[in-house]
Image (cartoon, helix red, strand yellow):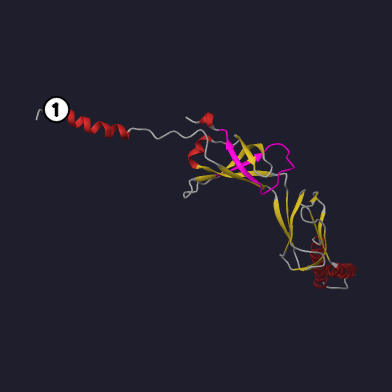
Amino acid sequence: MNPIYFWAVLAGLIWPLVAAGQETAPPLPLAPPELRAELITQRHVVLASDFAARVLEIAPEEGQSFKQGDLLVRFDCSLEKAQLERAQAQVKAAETKVSVQQRLSHLNATSRMEEELAAAEAATARAEMKIIQVRISRCELTAPFSGRVAERMAQPHQYVKAGDPLMEILDPNALQAVFLLPSRYLSHLAKGDAFKIHIDETSATYTALVTAIGARIDALSQSVKIVGRITGDHPELLPGMSGQAALEISSKLP
């Protein structure tokens, strides 16, 4: 076989394979596929009892609003108040004993040990009184922030134990939109970028800004968590609503 013909045929067979290996990956579409987003609240807490007591008052009903500092729960602390009166009497008696020992000490009519023991008894009585005062300060739970009652777990006149949940409260005005973004789009997104979110329950579209990007990519779903803050005041929005997020990243694509 003519050598020139042989190498020409071989090149004709190999070149398509080389060219196929040099083909670039298809470009990313101009927008990610459907991104389901959920509204969550930044401030959310479940209030619980610090000690065993009977609930006298649990003011707001489910769904009702409250202001920061409003009374939410009041316990029956009649026993603690009686203990405080006894502790105050013990403090007064101990301090009187200290005063007597100090006068006797000036007259050299008592020992140094008796004077120190009286002072120690007074310090112990004051510490016991402070413990009871702290418990009484917890007999009323006030709202740590303005918001609404999501759920009540206790009722007036109910006896609760330490650690029992009383009510779940949240701030519906501190809403965030959370969704999962395919990780291949991560290089085209940054904090502060704007996006739109269409909420199913309101049939309206809102503007949001990316406030946080997850620090870890889920290997199974190849996605990363994105958190955004909805701009403006929208009292119709509630935690738990959901919709579709649309990122404005087409101008950043290669």
Name the residue nearer the viewer: 162 or 59. Answer: 59
Q: On screen, 20 above or below 53?
A: above
Residue 106 visible in the picture = no
Q: Position of residue 147 (x, y in %)?
A: 76, 49
Residues in magenta?
225-248
Name the residue nearer the viewer: 46 or 195. Answer: 195
Q: Position of residue 110 (x, y in %)?
A: 86, 73
Quadrant of the drawing holding the N terminus: top left
Q: On screen, 142 above or below 81?
A: above
Amino acid under disc 1: Tyr
Q: On screen, 161 above or below 58?
A: below
Measuring 84% from the left and 66% from the top, which residue is drawn there? 77
Q: Residue lying farthest top?
A: 4
Whether residue 6 is in magenta: the answer is: no
Q: Quadrant of residue 56?
A: bottom right
Name the residue that disc number 1 marks: 5
